Each structure stands twice: as C-alpha cells, then as structure tokens.
Image (cartoon, rainbow, N blue to C red):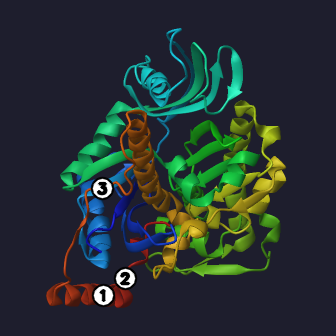
Amino acid sequence: MENDNLIVGLDIGTTKICAIIGRKNEFGKLEVLGMGKAVSDGVIRGIVTNIDKTVNAIQKAVQDAADMADVNIGEVIVGIAGQHIKSTVHHGVTIRRQNQDEITIEDVRGLSNDMENIVVPPGNSIIHVMPQDYTVDYEDGIKDPVGMSGSRLEADFHIITAQTTAINNINRCVKRANLISQDLILEPLASSLSVLGDIDKEAGVCLVDIGGGTTDIAIFYDNIIRHTAVIPLGGNIITTDIKEGCMVLHHQAELLKTKFGKAIAEEANPNEIVSIPGLRNRPPKEISIRNLAAIIQARMEEIIEYVQNELVASGHYKKLAAGIVLTGGGAQLHGVAQLFEYMTGLDTRIGYPNEHLGKCKIEEVKSPMYATTVGLVLAGFKSLDDRETSYNERNLESGGEIKQGLKVKPQERIPLSADKLFTRIGSRIKDIIGGDVGDEGGNY
C-alpha cells in the first residue's frame, strides 16, 4: 500500500466542499479509500468570498477523508467553476522547415504552447488549452498529425480562461489549509470524466452539471470538446424561490425541495399537503405540493432555456446523438430529466460515476452530487498516464527505454491510533443523535 499512487480530488463548491481519496485497482477502476465533506459558507457561485470560512471547510473535508483512509494528505487536484469562466476558440499556425521529414510530437506540443501566450482580457488567465482539429498543408479534419509530412501545421484550440483573482483566492485557500495544488481543473471537464464514456463523446453529448450556485455545460462531438459555458443559476436559487414563495425559513425551503420537490407540477398530487412548523407561538404552515412543484418548475424552465441557448450557440444542437447527460446535486430533483427532454427535444439521462468505480464501501460517492469530485481524482490519474506517455515518446525519439508506472508524490499512510479511533466513533455518534439538518449543506 505504501507504493500506491493516491490521488486526492478537492471540489470547492457553493453548497459543499468535498474531498475524495482514490487509487486505481488491478482492473483499472477507481477505488475510493476516503471521503470528507463540509458545509461551504465562504463560496458564492463558485467564487471564494470568505477566505477563513473556506479554509476551515477545506481542512475539515480533507481531514475527514484522511482519517477514513488513514493517510496524511499533502497534495490535491482542485476544481474551479463560476460565472467568470469564459471559453473561446483560437487558430494557431506554425511553419516547419522544408528539410524536416515528418511532424513530431514536439511540433504539436510547441503549437499548443504558443496558445499559452495569446492575449486574453485583462484580469484573466488561461487554465486550459485543448486542441480540436488539425490542418496539415491546408488538409483539414486531421485528429493526430504526428508522423505526417508537411510544412504548415495549423489547429483550432479551445481556450478556457478564468478570473485571475478567483484563481489566486482558491490557491490561497488551499495553501493556508497546508496543502499543495497539483492542478486546477474546470469542474464540468472533471465531471465529464466520471459520467461520460468515449461513445457518448464521439456521438455528440451535452453534459449539464447542476450545482448549488451555477449550472456548468460542456459539449462534446467527435471525441472533441466543442463548447463550454457557465450559467449563473443553480439549486440555491430554487431554494430561495421556495423560501420567498412559501414564506418559510431557508433550511425549511431546502428540505421541501429535496424531500418533496418535483420539476413537473402536473405530476404533483393537488391534494397532497405538507405541514411546516410555524414560527414562535404561531400555528404550523401548510404547503401544497402542487404549488411547490410550480415554483420549482418555473425556475428550472429558466435554467433549461439558458442551456438551450448555449446548445444553439455551439452549432452542435442537431448533432448530439447521445443527447443530454445531467449530473450534480440538481440532477436528483424528481422529473428533471423529463422536463429537459420536453423542452429541448433531446434524449436525457442522469449521469452517475458508477462506470469508473470499483468496489466501494462508500455508497454515497456513487451519487451524481459527487461526480465532480470523482472526476477530479480521475483527472489526476489521466494526467499521470499522459505524463508517462509523453515521457516514453520523448525517450523513443532519442533512442531511450520505455518506463512504466511514473509515480506521484505519495500521500503518507499513517496508523490509526486508539485515541483517533475513539474520537472518530464519538463524533459519528454525536452526528447520529445530535446532528443538525443544516449540516448537510443543501444537497442541490
């Protein structure tokens, strides 16, 4: 176990901060060793607004995951989201010398590196540069130009930028939590690794990740990322609508949404009533489930209209044979997939990270709510594989040997002391007999 590569994913979300520790088993599946979560009070729509609260939540989530896996966590893969995320497509060109025989991996990598130097709006930084289609001597539609002959190499690149201050604040929180950020990854890209297969991406699919503060979109076609967008609406705005429409407290509105909420009002029984405890010295309040569903449907339809606009803007609306895949906490809302199908005309399903998971004692991790965190761990292993492939390609070109199993800096495995064991058992008993509903942090 000491030599295993352990990857830690850290999802800094609007409603929760979650950490997952995983490793690859002998079958190449992800085995989750530990998981921790904490209420996110210092993040609004993906933006860190309170450093101290965010640091405390990160420390709690990471420590809970570390205790469960019996390791000391030093490095994490961090997710980033928010309305400040922007995406554009840029065209790059490089002219090779005539006496060069064939296009090498270094030529392709050099063209990608040139994209890192493009001018972006002030106050923004590039976080991802992803190649789409290549063109060699004006012959377009090439996916992999390595090995081809040609003097003019071109490519379209999907460039994703983020607000520099938002990046710095996330990195500052991670550092103050005594952690090192190995990589910063756009959350819908991480989610796509956990809930989408290669067949989905080849056929054409739109991933919609409905979080607490934002709804993230990633569109794939022909195994290439074509469009990304962030909608500044999520599950929290639905909770706020219920709070104001039904005149209840925020935590009561969250419970109404998660326990009785439906995305389609017609499916709700008009005679079904739920009673909410009244305020001090006041009688209980009765809420109609049909009225509750009407409030939810109105806001969800607005979110779907935004998604529809992004589908049309991408130019791939009529090409998505695999339809729409919903994930995130908001995907658990009853009837949401049917509402998406009705309004967009595209097949819709709920995306679960089960396909990439091996045997797991933590059943909770299979929920769409944790698709992003699972995806961040998978992204860490994918980065390892890419580094190994790149290393071997350079070695082969120089006549060297192939090396397998590049290692990351291992998370230090620690024995679980008796004191820590009793502390953990005591905290769990406390959670069971004295836990507060608000501790769940608003699932979606």
Residue under the image location 72 percent in, 36 percent down: 309
Amino acid type indicated by mark 3: Val
Q: Residues within 10 Å of mark 2 (few under 14, many from 20)?
A: few
Q: Which residue is mark 2?
A: 435
Q: Is residue 236 above or below residue 394?
A: below
Q: Which residue is mark 1?
A: 430
Q: Residues within 10 Å of mark 1 (few under 14, many from 20)?
A: few
SS category of the residue bearing label 3: loop
Amino acid type indicated by mark 2: Gly
Q: Quadrant of the C terminus?
A: bottom right
Residue 111 position in % (x across, y down): 48, 22
Amino acid type indicated by mark 1: Lys
Residue under the image location 48 percent in, 66 percent down: 442
Residue 431 position in % (x across, y down): 34, 84
Badge 1 or badge 3: first in the primary sequence: 3
- Mark 1 vs 2: CB contact within 8 A: yes
Q: Which residue is mark 3?
A: 408
- Mark 3 vs 2: CB contact within 8 A: no
